[in-house]
Amino acid sequence: MSDNKTEQKPVIRIEDLHKYFGDNQVLRGINLEVMPGEKVVVLGPSGSGKSTMLRCINALEETTSGKIYVNDVDITSPKTDINKVREHLGMVFQRFNLWPHKTVLENVALAPKLVSGVNKAEAEKKAMEMLKRVGLAEKANAYPASLSGGQQQRVAIVRALAMSPSILFFDEPTSALDPELTGEILEVIRLLADDHMVFVKAVVVQNDHEVQQAQASLDSGDTQEIVLKIKSGSHKGETVDAYSLNGYLYGADCKVGTKVIASLSEYDGELSANVYNYDRELEIGLLLAVFFGLMWLVGGKKGFNSIIALIFTFCVVIMLYIPMMYIGISPFASATVSVVIITFVTFVLIADFQMKSIGAMLGTIFGVIVSGLIALLFGHFGHVTGFNVDDIENLIYVGQNSRLDIGGMLFSGILIASLGAVMDVAMSVSTSLHESKEQRPDITAKEIFKSGINIGRDMIGTMSNTLILAYAGGSLGLVMIIYAYSYQMHQILNMYSLAIEIMRGIAGTIGIILTVPITSLIMSVLLTRGGQKISTDKCK
């Protein structure tokens, strides 16, 4: 077992931090814990106190009240040697702050030589290794003025890392850069932060405070100190001290025998582990097995074909739809191509390649595209874009490192989301009309169309409810917040999140409604022109 108990304590702990500039209170009652290996992002508008909080943690700014502990040292205490604390801290500023008269290599190697007493050869060797990691080895002898903004910021990051800090602060490191360079720097930060980190399976083998923790509620967010036995990866069979947040959102309520997924880091031969979440792979596998088993048992051959169709759909979404968007193809076009492929294969597997399946295919494709177009129109006139969704910060980051059209993703997703319900309606209508043609070979196109409309009317209500309730259930948390805080109606109707859910639900439902006349029209043509001979031959 590795002896790293101290590593599992918070590296930063803030207790009731307040900061005033004169009468202006910038920070009010800040409480925060940062554990080893964590990447923490502080978001907020300009002037909200982000940089001030960072400068307080680094003791570049005096606190008004409250406590700040860095590696268990109270930096707010006048007795603390702050310079000793700063030996373990790194800081990357907005404006690079490189020495203009020194080369890139000299900028990086200077601090280890002057502060840590590392000899010149060793300092420069380490500096070169770090420059290689960020792709700047060829710029070692260049001066800062000859570098781009993104290159200068990479040098600033490497310079901070050269002191081997246990904690690294970034004060808006991309604010002075254009979007392309911003993506470049964020990728460097991500790679450096994830260096040597892997996710492994593990099981809790020791928790000395299990009894006391069992009495605490899950929303307390208490930190658990535990021992894990690693069950996968290169360290399989080893034990390691770890921590877990005992909360609903993060970590796990760890008892002896609890199976978890842990993030494992190795630095200078020492292992450090944090519980990421429960290991649910077995439960997910069993649930899928029950689902597929029942589908096959009840549905027989068609049930088995449905399983194949579901697996195929999943593969198309993961291996075609998402990669197409990622490389810069229009999200709407990517969704349309995926819908056509999924629809064709699904109907061939479930209904074979016959007249009713052809009609259902065409009805589905047109119905789904209508849903997407309705959503696009609403988004245009209602000023709703793909940038109004949750996790937009992460999506912007992805978009900066790819050719992804973030704005179009929302509307593209509506095509995929409405596909199942539209497909069901189209298949039901086309099958019923095909049977009508089988029973009455002399039925006219007009009669087929009317029959399809009548059949569809019985389905529209239930299928619309299916789609609307699916979206309503997914946004139940939002609805509860609106109810609890008694939002005013005009405020509710103009919330981005609600507008998006309304757009998804209504656009999908309109697609279902219009699928009925579209499929009916298509079938009336197919069954009376060319389809008549096929149907008549079958009746003989």
Image: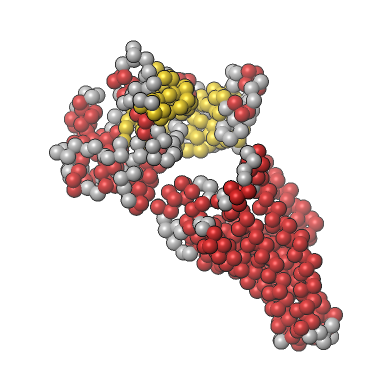
| Residue 513 appears in the picture as rendered | yes
Residue 86 occupies which quadrant of the picture?
top left
Q: Position of residue 375 (x, y in %)?
A: 58, 62
Q: Where is residue 509 in the image (x, y as percent from the top left)?
A: 68, 62
- Taking the view exactly as shown, the residue that stands out farthest to the top is 79
- Taking the view exactly as shown, the residue that stands out farthest to the left is 101
Depth check: give the residue in front, 433 or 122: 433
| Residue 339 appears in the picture as rendered | no
Which residue is painted at 29% across and 42% down in the image?
Answer: 154
How did the renderer colour the structure? secondary structure
Which residue is painted at 54% across and 32% down in the image?
Answer: 275
Residue 194 occupies which quadrant of the picture?
top left
Residue 525 occupies which quadrant of the picture?
bottom right
Position of 296 with respect to 208 (left or right) is right
Depth check: give the residue in front, 313 or 35: 35
In the rendered image, the vertical position of residue 419 relative to residue 111, given as above or below: below
Q: Quadrant for the C terminus, please.
A: bottom right
In the rendered image, the vertical position of residue 208 relative to residue 330, given as above or below: above
